[in-house]
Amino acid sequence: MAVDFQNYALNTNVQAGDTIVDKDTVKILENKLNRSEFKIKIEKQETKKGIIAIVRICGELDIYTHKLVEEVIQAEEMKSCHLVIDFQNITYADSTGLGTLIGVFKKRQNQGAASFDMCFINVGAELKKCFNVTGLTKIFKVFSTLDEVIKYL
């Protein structure tokens, strides 16, 4: 299911932690930090292996935003989905933000979701280097595009 986010009306009074859910289960969170605007957009799509949730994070994935990210991807309606994290609009990621993704992955696997996948797409060159050096590519599958993930799943 594709959603035209440009035509999706945002509530300008959204505060950190608020959630807007429409009938297509698209969530948009806004966290208005002093230094930047932060958004999470989720689009669900059916694949051969089940439902995937494409999580598009816009802004910084760091100590200030990691709780919002965790809250969204740990939500009950996300538990039956494979996760695809889109890094295209992530302007900065620190160890807290990346640690949150690792934590969610481990929690899901410990809850018995052995066939659960968390994949990354649109990861920049510098972050890819970081993933290789730290061994995160052994935990997460990194793809260039969403089409590659869909073929994999």
Image (cartoon, grey):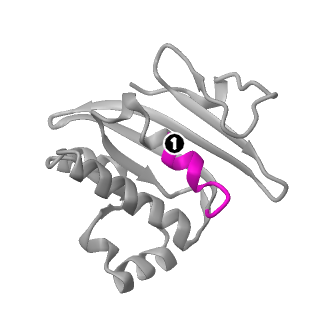
Could you say where residue 39 lies in the image, as x and y percent from the top left? 64, 43
The residue positioned 61% from the left and 29% from the top of the image is: 19
Query: Looking at the image, which is closer to me, 89 or 118?
Result: 118
Query: Looking at the image, which is closer to me, 1 or 67?
Result: 67
Res 102 visible: yes
The residue positioned 70% from the left and 22% from the top of the image is: 9
Q: Main secondary structure of the magenta part?
A: helix
Give the vertical position of 124 relative to 105 (above or below).
Answer: below
For residue 117, side relative to residue 23 (left or right): left
Could you say where residue 114 lies in the image, as x and y percent from the top left? 14, 49
Q: What residue is pinned by disc 1?
A: 71
The residue positioned 75% from the left and 31% from the top of the image is: 14
Could you say where residue 102 lies in the image, as x and y percent from the top left? 38, 62
Give the vertical position of 4 relative to 34 (above or below).
Answer: above
Amino acid type for the residue under numbered disc 1: Glu
Residue 83 in which image quadrant: top left
For residue 10, side relative to residue 28 (left or right): right
Q: Which residues are magenta?
A: 62-71
For residue 75, side relative to residue 11 (left or right): left
Could you say where residue 28 lies in the image, as x and y percent from the top left? 60, 33
